[in-house]
Amino acid sequence: MMRMRTLTQFFGFFFLRTCALFVVLILALLLGHIWQKGSGSLSWEFLSAAPRQGMTAGGIFPAILGTLCVTCIAAVLGMPLGIGCAIYLNEYAADTALTRVIRISIRNLSGVPSIVYGLFGVVLFVQLFKFGTSILSAGCTLGLMTLPWTITASEEALKNVPMAYREGALALGATKWQAIRTNVLPYALGGMITGTILSLSRVAGETAPILFTGAAFFLPELPKSVFDQFMALPYHLYIMSTQHHAVAKVRPLAYGTALVLIGLILALNLAAIILRARLRTMKKE
Amino acid sequence: MHDVKIKVSNFSLSYGDVPAIKNVTMSIKANRITGIIGPSGCGKSTFLRALNRMNDLILGVRTSGTILIDSEDILQKNVDVVHLRRRVGMVFQKSNPFPKTIFENVAYGLRIGGIKDKAYIEQKVEKSLQAAALWDEVKDRLHKSAFELSGGQQQRLCIARALAVEPEILLMDEPASALDPLATLKIEELIHELKKKYTIVIVTHNMQQAARISDFTAFFMLGELIEYDVANIMFTKPRKKITEDYITGRFG
């Protein structure tokens, strides 16, 4: 007869394993469903052409381009700002009431709903900075959204650099900034960039922050500068699934759009994973 | 020859409200090895780190008294600590080579000092590695990672790195505590060789080591300097009972 303890363990592990499998199952079902419904609309034309005939035919190239553009601007704004903030917090700032408030604020920023970021973007970038509803405004709004994750990941990367590297450099007569620049940042940069890419992949699929700041329902032409409005994958998907005059007819196109968006985000995640793996092997050398 | 290099007067240091070093007065002689011994937490490492102001990195450290190096008080606020640390090199307890090549480790101090002359750097790296008795072992793999070296070699690399910036004083915080006896012996021989050019202050946990290598020995306990004398005298007939108890291993 099986002992009670062994039996408890058996069911315990069974339960935990089921939990883990359940998570994987959800993702697999989701991806499978979207692939099944959307892969049919994938074609070279779908990726490279503009929508035609009231968005019932043609492709989604303007939306792909728009999403890439705002993501790039988010990176240009969010990466230096986030990494700079992390360096200040981890290397320079003393543990005072002020820095504690800053840290709590950063944590809380990641909990702010994305629609609130959108409204903030309207006030700050569209109106105050007079960027108008544009690629620039939307990109900057997304850039702000990446900050909490970029900062947290960058701080983590800095903490992983042994204190001995800093002390060793200082003991050789390095200034604080020299020690950080030559003996801390090179070893933290990989982790910082990985964190930034992951945070970009999170915001690339956001709809709410770009809704009021520059995303357009439909544009007959590609944007000519960063001050023009743009089409974006998540917003396009929203339109195709709820706002279109023939929702049922364009459903395959909507699934195709979803597939491209997920592909883009998976590609970003994959880049981060590869980068991290390569850095790990480099560290071992 | 027996000039005083470092003159410590009424030096106290506290972490916040916790005193770590109490009213220490001692003179450290040039081109001599001064050993600092004492039980864990007696303040000997803190004292060492005061000599190149490494304690500045810790928040809430307060000092009083004076530490004169060549008659300049290094505790003054306006002292250029970057310049000070170039004069007062340091080797840490745990060897801390940077994740760079052997060559770049030794060249590091020169490069951050603004030296760009390649030929000069190469020559300086070779000289420093020779001075640290490491050159013959690494001359064929200067551009390999410093992590490939053994523990003892890594520590000698750290010594070479400190020597490259031409300090006057070398502080060593238990430089051999993580090494095997053979590697320790090599480091000790090296330290003995180095005193011709440098003033050396070495913290050690190891009583035999202090007896073997130091010219003068200081015994610290609970932040106080209990006894300070020529090493020979200290280890044969200490004046205080407590010193004797410690060096004969009755507590530690």
Image: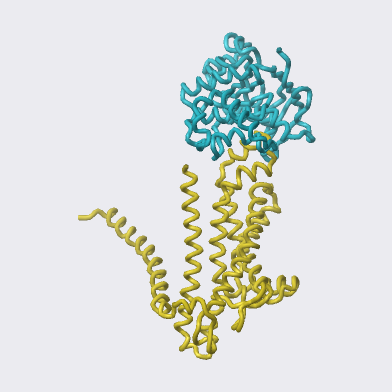
Chain colours: A yellow, B cyan
Of the pair B96 and A65, the residue shown nearer to us: A65
Q: Residue at 50% across / 90% down in the picture?
A: A246
In percent of width and height, residue B67 lies at 74, 26
Question: Is residue A234 among what the camera can see?
Answer: no
Where B113 sits versus A3, above or below? Answer: above
Residue that protrudes farthest toward the left in the picture: A1
Residue A148, placed above or below residue B23: below
Q: Position of residue A232 (x, y in %)?
A: 57, 76
Question: Relative to the observer, which residue lies in front, B58 or B249?
Answer: B58
Q: Is residue A168 above or below residue A68?
A: above
Q: How many marks?
A: 0
Q: Would you say B78 lies left or right of A73 here?
A: right
Q: As rendered, which of B103 and B242 lies closer to the eye?
A: B103
**Residue sitting at the far bottom:** A245
Q: Residue A191 at what x, y percent from top left?
A: 55, 52
Foreground residue among B77 and A261: A261
Determine if residue A285 is in view: yes
The answer to which image quadrant residue B21 occupies is top right
Q: Report x, y in % for residue A91.
A: 65, 47
Residue ID at (48%, 79%): A45
Which quadrant, please, contains the N terminus of chain A?
bottom left
